[in-house]
Image (cartoon, rainbow, N blue to C red):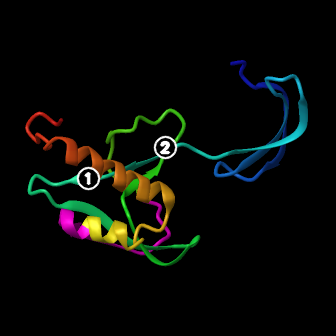
């Protein structure tokens, strides 16, 4: 199977580090050319399902501009260019949203996921994948696996 090819690209919107939109000219595997393929660039981010040694899940209840009402959310954030995705310094939170830290049981997390309380798809996916992983094998906190 032939891959798609990017023949050219140009920036049509550069709106800070959080949003860049490009327009690409691409060639499809069958040779057709599309001149105006939109491409959105956003910074990398991480969502983490954190579990305490007591088996409680660490989540936030928060408001977020793009989410109606309140939502449950995992720990996470944007990764700055060159930043390692591990703690290397004290937290310098620049969150604008209000949030409460929660410790939830697995039963509570599963119920919240089923009820749609994780209102952002990446958040719901991170939670669902973590629960799926934990169903396969108990987590060994001493080994970190």
Q: Name the residue under label 2.
A: 79
First along the sequence among labels 2 and 1: 1
- Residue at x 40% of width, y 72% of height: 117
- Where is residue 134 drawn, in percent x and y? 21, 47
The residue drawn where x is 20% and y is 62% is 106
The answer to which quarter of the image holds residue 66 is: bottom right
Residue 113: percent from the left, percent from the top? 35, 66
Q: Which of the 4 image quadrants contains residue 114?
A: bottom left
**Side of 34 where 115 appears, left or right:** left
Residue 106 drawn in magenta: yes
Which quadrant of the rendered structure holds the N terminus? top right
**Observer-nearest residue: 128 or 77?**
128
Tell me the residue at 89%/28% (across/down): 32
Binning the other alpha carbons within 10 Å of mark 1 as few (below 14), some (14 to 19) or many (20 upward) gives: some
Foreground pick, 131 / 29: 29
Q: Give the range drawn in magenta.
A: 93-108
Cα distance between the residues tagged 2 and 1: 18 Å
| Residue receiving disc 1 | 50
Q: Where residue 140 sits: x, y (%)?
A: 11, 40
> In front of the other: label 2 or label 1?
1
Q: Quadrant of the C terminus?
A: top left
């Amino acid at each position: 199977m032939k891959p798609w090819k990017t023949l050219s690209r140009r920036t049509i919107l550069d709106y800070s580090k959080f949003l860049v939109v490009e327009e690409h000219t691409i060639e499809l595997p069958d040779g057709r050319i599309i001149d105006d393929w939109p491409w959105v660039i956003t910074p990398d981010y991480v969502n983490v399902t954190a579990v305490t040694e007591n088996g409680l899940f660490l989540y936030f209840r928060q408001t977020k501009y793009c989410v109606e009402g309140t939502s449950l959310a995992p720990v996470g954030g944007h990764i700055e260019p060159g930043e390692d995705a591990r703690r290397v310094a004290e937290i310098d939170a620049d969150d604008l949203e209000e949030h409460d830290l929660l410790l939830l049981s697995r039963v509570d997390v599963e119920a919240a996921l089923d009820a749609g309380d994780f209102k952002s798809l990446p958040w719901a996916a991170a939670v669902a994948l973590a629960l799926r992983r934990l169903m396969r094998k108990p987590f060994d906190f001493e080994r970190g696996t």
